Image: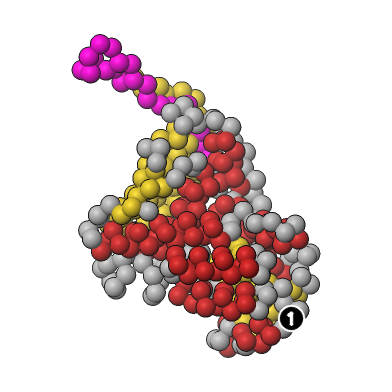
Amino acid sequence: MKAAVIGLGYWGPNLVRNFLSNGEIKSVICCDNNPARLKLINEKFPAAIITNSYSGILKDKSVDIVVIATPVDTHYQLAKEALQNGKHIWVEKPFTAKSKQAEELIKLADKHDLKIFVDHTFIYNGAVKKIKELTVAGELGDIIYFDSVRVNLGLFQHDINVIWDLAPHDLSIMSYILDAKPIAVSANGIANYSKYENVAHLSVYFDNNTFAHFHVNWTSPVKIRRMIVGGNKKMLVFDDMENSEKIKVYDSGVEITTQEGIYDALVQYRIGDMYSPKVNQTEALNLGVKEFLASIKEDRQPLTNGVEGLKVVKILEASDESIKRKGKLISL
């Protein structure tokens, strides 16, 4: 197959590298309207074909896949044109700027029998795949809560707030891990440096009483990438900043013994052993490319498809509405 990568900014070179290194891809076209980016890609990846013409890519019938790594407000139009011209699409997170746009793209892809891959990269991360295995096996028991912190100093985005920038990573992980339906969202945030919030807290409520919370921040003096998944049997901590032992499973929990009256309820804390399961270290983006190409060859939906992308966009939209209304609970 032949692929074209549109947008060669921060993430674009990683996409070019991974598509070029896949044996199923015969060539990669790299497209950007910035000559400096094209020059950089040409020097770094001599095998890549360089162009500044997106319309030329659309007209090229030999191009099977269009990879869109541009600002989110351009995703819809670029993706729509690619689908209309018979191309499978890979779209960076978040999928679209509006849920209606995502719904339209999903319908268009179905109509033309094309595949949509949304780059929720962390779903292909070895640690996240291990967390999924543990939850499916019942290692943690019933999931009670999902708590995530993703903070750092920069990178400020000029078209979206910090929730739209950082939360999609953890929202996609949440959707992948939790076997429950989100029913409402509450969010609070503040914009100190531009019109877009740079610090925010997002809460997601589920139909089975599970609760998820996300703290995102562009202005933290330290970089933290930590997630806690609490079950009624065991609890798990995923720290992506750890070089080894990224996952730690704790045999800890709370047990409540109720006697005759409510005031006789006894809370007992169980603190047991901790262990760190082995995690596959294969690059997540490499596995994502393999999954996308396999879904095309096997004519099936990829793991991170348009519907999964839509789920995240709906939560992001609701978070915007909640922030505007000072944390009001917004139903999904």
Q: Residue 300's x, y, as percent?
A: 69, 56
| Above/below status of 149 relative to 316 | above
Q: Which quadrant would residue 28 be assigned to in this image?
A: bottom right
- Name the kind of residue labelled 1 in the image: Lys
Horizontally, residue 84 falls left or right of residue 74, namely right
Magenta stretch prevailing secondary structure: strand
Q: Is residue 182 visible?
A: yes
Above or below, comparing residue 261 to residue 198 in the picture: above
Between residues 332 and 97, which one lies in front from this camera angle?
A: 332
Up the image or down, 15 lies above or below 33; here it is above
Mark 1 residue element: loop
**Quadrant occupied by the N terminus:** bottom right
Give the labeled residue for mark 1: 61
Picture coordinates of residue 228, whole percent (x, y): 43, 41
Q: Position of residue 69 (x, y in %)?
A: 55, 72
Please provide the residue range marked out in magenta: 247-267
Does residue 259 belong to the magenta stretch? yes
Residue located at (28% from left, 52% from top): 329
The reply to whether the magenta stretch includes residue 248 is yes
Residue at x 41%, y 47% (from the top left corner): 182
Of all residues, the one furthest to the front in this rendering is 111
Q: Quadrant of residue 80?
A: bottom right
**What residue is at 51 percent from the left and 74 percent from the top?**
76
Could you tell whether 295 is left or right of 202 in the image?
Answer: right
Q: Nearer the viewer, residue 44 or 48?
A: 48
Q: Residue at x 33, y 16 (%)?
A: 257
Q: Is residue 235 above or below residue 190?
A: above
